[in-house]
Image (spheres, rainbow, N blue to C red):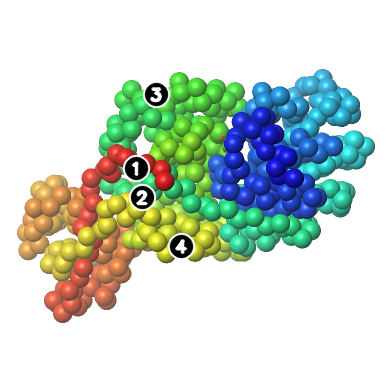
Amino acid sequence: MLEQLLPALKQTFGYDTWRDGQAEIISATLSQRDCFVLLPTGGGKSLCYQLPALHLPQVTVVVSPLMSLMKDQVDALIANGIAAAFINSSQSREDILEVFAQLRRGELKLLYVAPERLLQPSFLARLSEVGVSLFAIDEAHCVSQWGHDFRPDYMALAQLKQHFPQVPMMALTATADPGTQQDIVQQLGLQGPLIYRGSFDRPNIRYTVQEKFRPLEQLLAYLKQQENNSGIIYCSSRRKVDELAAQLQERGFKVAAYHAGHDAINREQVQDAFKRDDINIIVATVAFGMGVNKPNIRFVVHFELPRTIEAYYQETGRAGRDGVAAEALLLFDPADIVRMKRWLEAEENPERAEVARQRFQSMASFAEAQTCRRLVLLNYFGEARQQPCGNCDICLNPPTQFDATETAQKALSCVYRVKQNFGLHHVIEVLRGSQNQKIQEYGHDKLSTWGLGKALSHDYWLSIFRQLIHFGLLQQDITQHSVLRLLPAARPILRGEQPLMLAVPRLQTPQKSSAKPS
Ligand code: ADP
Ligand code: ZN
């Protein structure tokens, strides 16, 4: 049967071969079997239902959460000569009636709808009348409360199987840990589904985590290397998005801001300009991206720590969809962890709070890990791997350790000398022999540790202190203006009873990517 479909693959879609999983999924679908499709972003999920749709007698109904995504897909299908349409709230009554007429005449192969529309009784009745060959639920993780992007509208899709028990269903997602995956299958009521899990590896994406010292400067240096490449910069708040976009604009970058606080028309203009390469860089919140099908995005920067590995993976996955080398850069400040944890405490439902905490903890561990980034990612998604990838910052530039005993002693004793009553930057300035007003005021220029660390930069010390915090020798007391306090483990180091190895701080920006995709 698949051999018969090869001409369609070639003629209608212009591809010569199947991608990972497509053949298996399509043949299961054509033999009426439910499918659960877990393929990474860019893995070619759409084809899994679009191609069967051409060969099935009645319409294939595709449930999709985003209007912009629907329109893009339908436009692309029509351009390929496939009869497709969508129904959503952006349309006029006439447009919708016209789509219904096409549906009734049996002209449509694919119909895209939003979940809330699908479940209206009158709509369900229409579908029953004309008959449906296949339901495809895109972004199916939205159905699960345990997923990272739960949408209440999706919950109701659980009823679909009751209304159409005979119609095969395909659930598709790019992000699902094993728990969410089970939940999706259960919620949608898939019957003995084919479960296809593709590899989540994106070998052409180079993962880099850079410690954040001077965020804007670091970012500017990075963007300069990128020249006119297309990229996305993710921030965690709308305020930060607007601020950063303005700063980049001032410096002459072709950049636009994107977040849910802007109106729909503005957002669409920004997306279009990005697609046409009129704009190189989008600074955005997580609101940007689900429907972005731009193949030549060369880099994705996370200016702040994302909340989950799923989100990080999905956002970085928007880079390099064309298979050409691309980069994912995470600028990481350990203080973001503290900030985020406080923020997570606001979640009231205790179960959801626990899920959120666990997911965030995994993200934080990824940022702090000293092992191959790709190994951490793939193992998180349950894809057991042992071989380091050779295309991440850790593999390309393994952290070098040095005997930091003496350096640590200077740092720790300076914390002790200021009576464990001052924050990170003040202690560093004392070590570096600064004469600033606060230091003079407190007489800290008279301390024995004043100026002991003059030879090293502020950023260097910052990295050392962060490692001391990370290793449990120091603590930042968040209830007391983040003053540094010594922990018991600092004692043997201070007394010279125990040596300490730390990573040599990395202060430079990463090298421009020269990797070829494998
Ligand atoms: P997903 O929905 O999984 O993120 P898409 O369905 O948007 O991925 O497909 C990603 C890209 O891969 C698209 O540009 C699509 O045209 C392309 N593609 C899909 N299937 C094939 C194939 N068999 N051969 C070559 N390219 C393909
Ligand atoms: Zn690696």
Determine which residue is flagged by label 2. Answer: 391
Which residue type carries mark 4? Answer: Arg
- CA–CA distance between discs 4 and 3? 40 Å
- CA–CA distance between discs 3 and 2? 29 Å
Find residue 166 and report its horizontal and vertical position in percent: 87, 50
Q: Is mark 3 within 8 Å of ligand 1?
A: no
Q: Residue furthest bottom?
A: 497
Rendered position, 468 above or below 172? below
Q: Residue furthest front?
A: 3
State the SS at label 2: loop
Determine which residue is flagged by label 3. Answer: 254
Q: Mark 3 or mark 1, which has the lower sequence index?
A: 3
- CA–CA distance between discs 4 and 1? 21 Å
Image position of 278 (left or right of 176): left
- CA–CA distance between discs 3 and 1? 26 Å
- CA–CA distance between discs 2 and 4? 15 Å
- Crowding at dot 3, Cα within 10 Å, few <14 / some 14-19 / many 20+, comes out as some
Determine which residue is flagged by label 1. Answer: 515
User: Which of the pair 203/368 is nearer the observer?
Assistant: 203
Ligand 1: give its quadrant. top right
- Crowding at dot 4, Cα within 10 Å, few <14 / some 14-19 / many 20+, comes out as few
Give the foreground label among 3 and 1.
1
Which residue type carries mark 1? Answer: Ala
Q: Mark 4 or mark 1, which has the lower sequence index?
A: 4
Task: Tell me the residue at 23%/45% (across/down).
Answer: 508
